Amino acid sequence: MNPAPNLVLVGPMGSGKSSIGRRLADRFGLAFFDADREIEAQAGASIATIFECAGEPDFRARERIVLAGLLAGEGAVVATGGGAVLDARTRELVRGRGFVVHLHVDVAQQLERLARDRSRPLLAGDDREQVLRRLAEVRDPLYAEVADLRFDTAAMAAAETAVKLGHLLDARWQMSVPATGAHR
Ligand code: S3P
């Protein structure tokens, strides 16, 4: 049983972090936050516009600041963006302030789920499959580095995944403030 004040979902685009996170928050009676939406609200601009006008490094800095704010308190379920783990300070932050679940999904499933999506700047080009494979190569070890639990969403719908994950979390996650400020 790992104590941590918040629940954090990491994983690639299309792994269901937001839809599963919202359901888990309902189940545990906690507040849900989607870091991407918070970044957009604070910037007054879409993620695509931030990438285009300020660049990815600026987006990653905004992401880190927003996550630090969301995780400063207790009792939040936070869906992070797929690339949040790229930033070492963000990795340290989510590990220190959350029980971290890595939602895994394979590339074929991602392609299916994201087929109609036009909002993600990293998928604006033609070869989505190649991009997703390249991102997974770089990011999978980082998801593993921060995760307390890895959960394969496979072909399951969000509702089913949330029920199964909720049961696992009952046994694995204790919502509390770690005595040392870090739970591992
Ligand atoms: C990104 C994933 C997106 C969003 C941005 C960058 C990434 O979030 O933060 O487009 O680098 O993988 P989702 O994982 O919620 O799609």
Image (cartoon, rainbow, N blue to C red):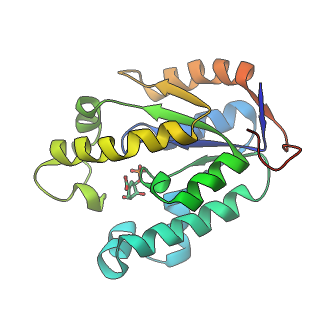
Q: Left or right: 179 with respect to 38?
A: right
Note whether 134 is above or below 156 in the view shown: below
Which residue is painted at 67% across and 38% down in the image? 25
How many numbered marks have been drawn onto this rendered protein structure? 0
Rendered image quadrant of residue 146 = top right
Q: Position of residue 35 (x, y in %)?
A: 54, 57
Placement of the N terminus among the 4 image quadrants:
top right
Residue 6 horizontal/vertical position (percent): 72, 44
Q: Is residue 19 visible?
A: no
Above or below, 180 relative to 61 = above
The residue closer to the viewer here, 132 or 14, is 132
In this view, the residue farthest toward the left is 126
Choose top left, top right, bottom left or bottom right for residue 177. top right
Residue ranking furthest to the bottom: 53
Against 183, is 86 above or below? below
Relative placement, left or right, of 156 versus 62 is left
